[in-house]
Amino acid sequence: MELNVDHKGTEIKLMTYRWEPEQDQEVKGVIFMVHGYGANAAQMAVVAKYMAQNGYDVFAVDMRGHGDSEGERGVFLSSDQLYSDLWAFIFESIKKFRINQQTTPLFLMGRSFGGLLITNMANTLVGKSMFKGVVLITPYYRLFTERLYEAYKYLVPLTYVRPNHLFLSEYAEMDPEYYKRYEQIFKDPRNVDGFTATTARIWVEEQEVARKSISETPLPICFLIATEDGVVRNDYIEEFSGLASHPQNECHKVHGADHTDLIFNEHYCSQMIRTIDNFLDKLLTTNNN
């Protein structure tokens, strides 16, 4: 499915996707998924297919400049543009497929950078009233090195004069064995392996917003941590999970998994899917009582 979005007079097409339950299967709820930076919705397909088999209607989008969506690769104009795109994706999906928000529970699910964005969306006035729960897969609350934060004071002025100045992703410094293990990802022409000054600034500033969001949102949240994650800081995810106050919140560790294993390794991915499934089913049971 294609979605036309406009930001400050520039219209582009975003690719959106749907995985739906069998026709004779009762729909438990609807999940809106957001992928991580540099990735695309297709990388979440295994999770989406399983959740659809278990009765959830699942929607996903390729963020602009990612996957098969239009836009310069990896280029975000602003955080406003990012959130505007995601809300348009959600509202248009609801409208096109006539989802009854009064009778159908809606959930948010985000991975890595998508998890950061979802955290902040969940604490908006609309998010608080629209959704029944949130799933955060290795949310990007802090990068595993401090370089980004040490450079932040230089990033701000750079975004005014050279907003799309390109930096090489720190993935490039990882062990060659990592590349070999996930060769299919890095050889995918849709993969984004760099980031702009504006994107880096958005990361830092949205992470600061997330700290406030996570402590204020009234929605139940499931946090998923990969114990061997070398991309995001697990201590920050644990800290944020402690700031969230809903009594149905859960925080789970997938032992032995790294940032990518949770999506591409069958063993770790199956563990994660069962955890998500159980969490959402428990929310549905509670809401129905």
Image (spheres, helix red, strand yellow):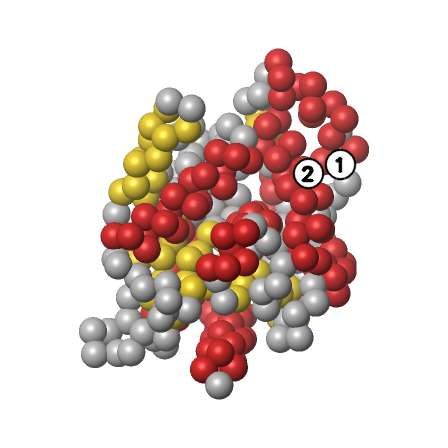
Q: Which residue is at a point 71% across and 43% down the rendered structure image?
A: 208
Task: Work out whether residue 265 or residue 45 is closer to the camera in this orientation and state it.
Answer: 45
The amino acid type of the residue labelled 2 equals Val
Which residue, as the protein is rendered here, is positioned at the far bottom? Answer: 289
Label 1 with label 2: CB-CB less than 8 Å: yes
| Residue 109 visible in rendering | no
The amino acid type of the residue labelled 1 equals Tyr
Task: Work out whether residue 185 or residue 92 is closer to the camera in this orientation and state it.
Answer: 92
Q: Is residue 161 left or right of residue 87?
A: right
Give me the C-alpha separation between circle 1 and circle 2. Answer: 7 Å
Q: Which residue is mark 1?
A: 149
Whole-percent x and y of residue 28?
37, 75
Whole-percent x and y of residue 73?
44, 31
Q: Which residue is at a point 63% across and 59% down the rendered structure image?
A: 217
Task: Work out whether residue 131 or residue 56 is closer to the camera in this orientation and state it.
Answer: 131
Task: Work out whether residue 95 or residue 199 is closer to the camera in this orientation and state it.
Answer: 95
Whole-percent x and y of residue 164?
55, 22
Which comes sooner in the sequence, label 1 or label 2? 1
- Asked if 146 appears above or below 262 in the picture, the reply is above
| Residue 152 visible in rendering | yes
Label ID, residue 93: none
Which residue, as the protein is rendered here, is positioned at the far top? Answer: 161
Q: Which residue is mark 2?
A: 204
Q: Which residue is at a point 65% across and 32% down the rendered structure image?
A: 201
- Asked if 164 appears above or below 112 in the picture, the reply is above
Q: Quadrant of residue 4?
A: top left
- Mark 2 lies on a secondary structure that is helix
